[in-house]
Amino acid sequence: DGLILLQRSARADGRMRFFNPDGQPARMCGNGARCLARLIHELAPAQRCVTLETDNGLVAADILADGVRLALPPPSDCRLNRILDLAGRSCRVHTIDTGVPHAVLEAEDLESADLAGLGPAIRRHPMFAPQGANVNWMACTGPDAIAVRTYERGVEAETPACGTGITACALIAARLGRAAPPVRARCRHGDTLIVNFRLSADGFEGLTLQGPAAFTSAGRLEL
């Protein structure tokens, strides 16, 4: 869903720069960071732990047999039960910044969630100006399990998976008492990612995002 650049870094094994399809940069991409860590491992197979410099701070990634586990900086600005006015219609959302600002809505039936209608309106709501926010619909499917769909800014459509969005939903679900960590989160693509953390009085600690990341192909771009 975006372009990731691997650059040299004086602070880490590499620097990640991420651009959405609309050409705008984003501070963080959770799944993108896991993929980039896996690529660095492919280039240097002996390296099982990779550090990345991102615009949201340093992150560390462990290369596992079945995927990549990413240690994320603490999230910020977690607020529950915010009411948005959408052309006379009220909408309850929860908000949190996991490297990207996210709005989270609870849904009993994800299949009937109005991503095409509500997604653009919430994404551009004045509450999130000027940068906007990703919009996630979350359904709790068990004591430690959720399912997530995401309308992503910069893509301006639903995406098959959003790592920072899945992380946001898992954190909100725990703060609401809907799910206990580690939270297993199923994305639209069908993969299940694991979000682990500890709840604290004023936030979250030890946040990690784990899921599959597979090397598929390589090519050369002639500029």
Image (cartoon, rainbow, N blue to C red):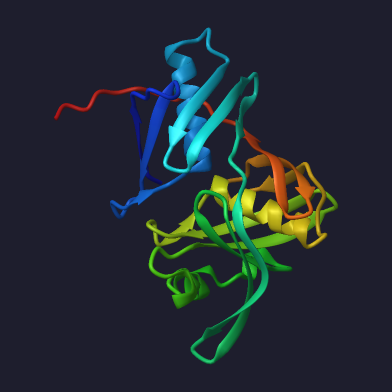
Q: Quadrant of residue 207?
A: top right
Q: Tell me if I can see residue 163 in this picture.
A: yes
Q: Is residue 195 visible?
A: no
Instruction: Tell how many labels.
Output: 0
Q: Nearer the viewer, residue 86 or 11?
A: 11
Locate residue 49 relative to residue 223 in the image: left or right. Answer: right
Residue occupying the point 52% across, 50% down: 160
Residue 10 is left or right of residue 182, and the answer is left
At horizontal 79% and vertical 45% (from top left) the residue drawn is 181
Dividing the picture into quadrants, the one containing residue 172 is bottom right
Q: Quadrant of residue 104?
A: bottom right
Question: Residue most toward the bottom?
Answer: 88
Left of 196 or right of it: where is 96? left
Q: As drawn, which residue projects farthest toward the front? A: 202
In the image: residue 114, left or right of residue 29? right
Q: Position of residue 2 (x, y in %)?
A: 37, 44
Residue shown at 33% from the left, 23% from the top: 8
Residue 166 in the image, given as x and y percentages of width and height: 62, 50
Question: Which residue does the image show at 47% across and 37% down from the upper left?
Answer: 32
Q: Point out the residue furthest to the top here.
A: 46
Q: Position of residue 214 (x, y in %)?
A: 52, 26
Q: Quadrant of the C terminus?
A: top left
Q: Extreme right residue here?
A: 143
Q: Is residue 16 above or below residue 190?
A: above
Placement of 39 over or under 183, stated as above or below: above
Counting from the top left corner in percent of width and height, residue 105 is at 64, 68
